[in-house]
Image (cartoon, rainbow, N blue to C red):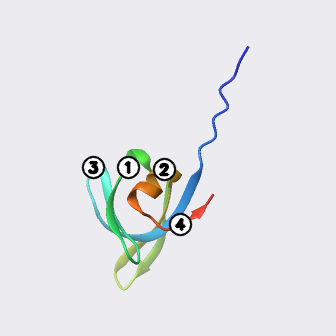
Amino acid sequence: MTTNNTFESLIICEGIEVSESPTKILFRQRYNQCWVNKSDIRVKETLGFLDGEKMIRIVVPEEVANTLELEGILD
């Protein structure tokens, strides 16, 4: 019997949720703003509000973070 033990590197990113559509969110960090597909987000957590903007933390695969040039730390 074989098992498929695949490991997915995940990146934790914090930023501002600018807008949201049914399939993606517009995510802004210090030097970057991009659309992130909801299907790529493993975890989404609201951190609070700063100057009326919604601060969130998302966890995405490292490949997605690199492609979108997101800043974050390895989970």
User: Mark 3 or mark 4, which has the lower sequence index?
Assistant: 3
Task: Give residue 71's position: percent from left, percent from top.
Answer: 49, 68
The amino acid type, in three-letter code, at marker 2 is Glu
Task: Give whichever of discs 2 and 4 has the lower sequence position.
Answer: 2
User: Residue 33 sits in which quadrant?
Assistant: bottom left
Q: Secondary structure at mark 1?
A: helix
Which residue, given by chain and number where applicable, does mark 3 sit on? 22
The answer to whether residue 64 is above or below residue 74 is above
Residue at numbered disc 1:
38
Q: Nearer the viewer, residue 70 or 27?
A: 70
Which tag is nearer the camera, tag 3 or tag 1?
Answer: 1
Q: Could you tell me residue 65's position as x and y percent? A: 46, 57
User: As displayed, is residue 7 above or below residue 17?
Assistant: above
* Left-right relation of 73 to 64: right
Q: Residues within 10 Å of mark 3 (few under 14, many from 20)?
A: few
State the SS at label 2: helix
The percent coordinates of residue 51 (x first, y second) are: 36, 86
Identify which amino acid the numbered label 1 is placed on. Answer: Lys
- Disc 3 on helix, strand or loop? loop
User: Which residue is labeled 4 in the image?
Assistant: 72
Q: Residue at x 67, y 31 (%)?
A: 5
Is 20 displayed left or right of 45 in the figure?
Answer: left
State the SS at label 4: loop
Where does label 2 land, which residue? 63
